[in-house]
Image: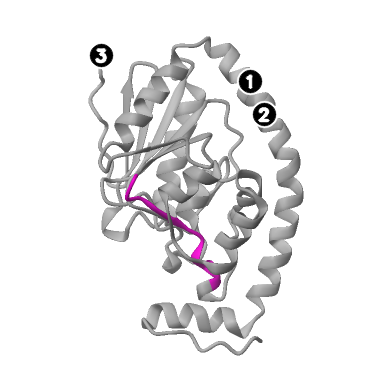
Amino acid sequence: MTDVPMTEDPIVTTERRGHVFVVSMRREHKRNAVDRALAEGLSAALDQLDDDPDLWVGVLTGTPTVFSAGSDLKSLGDNVTERGGEYGIIRRARTTPLIAAVEGPALGGGLEIAFSCDLIVAADDATFGLPEVKRGLVPTSAGLFRSLQALPRSLAKELVLTGRDVDAAWLERAGLINRVVASGEALAAALELADDIAANGPVAVQAALAAMERIIRELDERGWEATDEARRRVEESDDAKEGIAAFFERRPPRWTAR
């Protein structure tokens, strides 16, 4: 297999490995928190993955220390792209299989990005969580309903309502993560899985994926409606303002339940 040299970008890098395409988030100094630039970089890379007929499988990863901490709160939600939706991926109608290779934290929107992939490979010291309720907020990038699709109901509710971090082993037992590997090996293991998929008939793989995604999208429509209702309720609350203020001021929030 001949590798094509990596194309450098301040935010996102891409690399071809035969029929496999690796997309890496490289905003490590901000823990790969997604702002407008990172969302556009991800969207452009995933456009290329879906539009190039010679690319049959994608792998999405971060850096060796972090997958993604989710939204950059300072961007005020300016992370939606025309084709991909939130973060350039959340509402994307993909035609090519995509594997998440997770090292380090995948929190909030970072976990929602992983939910948007088809398969997940994680390092044994990776951490996952939907901490929005700790800030008086709710997950708004499909975490509320994709957690229910991917996990047993009680575990999905635990993840959302406690806001606590869980480890890769917890999510592997719950059925979300496909492989847990040693720290530093997530990308290598994801590439092995990608090669297994790429060895199959690409038309058959894409047709199978499209059929499964069509079923999921029908469920997603109701999920987005419920999420929008929850978002509106939270955005009007004093607790949401307090949670954000406490986050930036690095102090415990003082909830009023209003």
User: Who's the residue at 39% across and 19% down the image?
Assistant: 195
Numbered tag placed on residue 107 in the rendering: none
Camera-near label (3 vs 2) is: 2
Q: Is residue 129 magenta?
A: yes
Q: Is residue 238 left or right of residue 188?
A: right
Residue 45 position, x and y percent, is 42, 35
Q: Earlier in the sequence, mark 3 or mark 2?
A: 3
C-beta proximity under 8 Å, tags 1 and 2:
yes
Circle 1 packing at 10 Å, graded few (<14), some (14-19), many (20+), is few
Give the residue number, with chain letter if any, for mark 2: 212
Residue 177 forms part of the magenta stretch: no
In three-dimensional space, the C-alpha distance between marks 3 and 2, rounded to whole angstroms, equals 32 Å
Residue visible at 63% across and 60% down in the picture: 157
Magenta stretch, residue numbers: 124-133
Residue 208 is tagged as 1
- Mark 3: secondary structure: loop
In this rendering, the answer to whether 191 lies above or below 227 is above
Location of residue 95 by image quarter: top right
Q: Amino acid at mark 3?
A: Thr
Q: Which residue is mark 3?
A: 2
Quarter location, residue 3: top left
Return the residue nearer the eye: 103 or 172.
172
Q: Is residue 75 above or below residue 15?
A: below
Residue 88 seen by the camera: no
What's the residue at 57%, 71% (across, down)? Answer: 137
Which circle's residue, 3 or 1, is located before the other in the chain? 3
C-alpha span from label 1 to label 2? 6 Å
